[in-house]
Image (tube, helix red, strand yellow):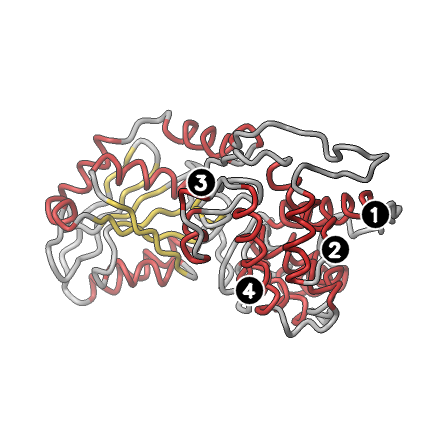
Amino acid sequence: MKLNRNSIYIHLLALLLLLAACGQKRQEPVVAPWGEIADTIPAGEDFDLDDIQRNGELIALTLTGPETYYDYRGKHLGTHYLLCQRFADQLGVSLRMEVCRDSSEMLQRLADGEADLICYPLSKKGLGWMVDKEKEDLHQELQKWYRPSLMAEVKKQEEYLLSSRSVRRRVFAPMLNRSGGVISHYDAFFQHYASQIRWDWRLLAAQCYQESTFDPQAHSWAGACGLMQIMPSTADHLGLARSDIYHPEKNIAAAVKYMAELEQSFSDINDRSERTKFVLAAYNGGGYHIRDAMALAGKYGRSANRWREVEPFVQGLQRAEFYNDPVVHNGYMRGSETVNYVRRIMERWNGYRGVKTVHSAACPTGVPQKAKRQRKAKYQVTESP
């Protein structure tokens, strides 16, 4: 369902009326400095602050979105997520953030005792919390912990994490010796390992420059390491020892092994040149998000196997009407970043080959015209004045 700004209150009111009709005792909501803590939903068991700390985990519910929660290259971001993480750190427990499809699911799961709190967006005050009425100590701890400056702090933190300043790397020239055709000090490795996936080695070099600017010691805030910015968890999966993660050749070899897996996962795309773009996009943004964009492309009558026709929907996953679409299973993504990642690599590859890049005109909003017409027809009735 499409969540508008008032729907969470409508669902909450309906649930409260239902509980009152069943003879449940009601308790007035508590207004916090940053929003409303509604502690009117009974739980099956009294699992309060001491139990949460003893269990070692805080379970929070939210919705997917740029302000709430999303996956970014294997790490979790979003203002609400970062706030919940800080609160969990304050309690000395880990955070399990679970994404619901809509406000009804959040309310029902809290009522069923499946979570400790709800974190949701407010139209004017920015953020609201909903805590089970039995968790009085948790509610009091939230009130005591929060301070008005926290919202601005986490937004600033997120902006930094998403900027190039959060990546520690030395910036080298994109080509070491143009007249001699030498791209980098690692050309021999690119040539050897690119052949394993039948890629032009210059394409692999172009991708490497996009990832690390040829700095083998590059390190990102998310933990990505080395020339090809491999995550430690990915290194474990690929059999690359963490002690070798900064080793130039081993880092490149592991990245190629991972791209071979991505090639296989997109084997339904028969055109190799097309499949390469999908593999690059998946390397950057996650294959599950790219599959969501492909599903959207198919829904709107576009070819799901041609990157030019899927690309607008990768960008579209930044918009609520797309990341909340029923065919999308993995929510919001920073699609414009992934689209630019693929474009820059392809342009640099063309430069390495001496091929002139031809820029095609794109829809300025990033949404195909056909999709825009359908979206307008579908949603114009529900739009607020």
Question: Tags 4 and 3 in contact by the CB under 8 Å rule?
Answer: no
Give the tally of numbered discs: 4
Identify whether 20 is placed above or below 248. Answer: below
Mark whose residue sits in front, 2 or 4: 2
Q: Residue at x 28, y 37 (%)?
A: 87
Q: Work out whether mark 2 precedes mark 3 in sequence or the reverse, and give the earlier one.
A: 2
Mark 2 touches mark 1? (CB < 8 Å): yes
Q: Residues within 10 Å of mark 4 (few under 14, many from 20)?
A: some
What residue type is disc 2 on?
Asp
Q: Earlier in the sequence, mark 2 or mark 1?
A: 2
Q: Earlier in the sequence, mark 4 or mark 3?
A: 3
Q: Residue at x 63, y 72 (%)?
A: 267
Identify which residue, 6 or 336, lies in the foreground. 336
Along the line of sight, which residue is nearer the eye, 321 or 296?
Answer: 296
Crowd tier of the residue under label 3, counting other residues whose Cα lies within 10 Å: few below 14, some 14–19, many 20 or above: some
Q: Which residue matches tag 1?
A: 353
Q: Earlier in the sequence, mark 2 or mark 4?
A: 2
Q: Secondary structure at mark 2?
A: loop
Q: Which label sits in the foreground, 2 or 3? A: 2
Q: Which residue is mark 2?
A: 200
Q: Position of residue 352 (x, y in %)?
A: 80, 44
Q: Give the residue displayed 50% in from the left and 57% down from the top.
A: 331
Residue 227: image x %, image y %? 57, 41
Q: Which mark is residue 223?
A: 3
Name the kind of residue labelled 3 in the image.
Gly
Which of discs 4 and 3 lies nearer the camera? The answer is 4
Distance in Å between CA atoms under marks 2 and 4: 18 Å
Mark 4 = which residue?
Answer: 261
What amino acid type should be assigned to the residue bearing mark 1? Arg
Q: Position of residue 105 (x, y in %)?
A: 35, 63
Task: Name the residue type under label 4.
Answer: Glu
Q: Residue furthest top?
A: 149
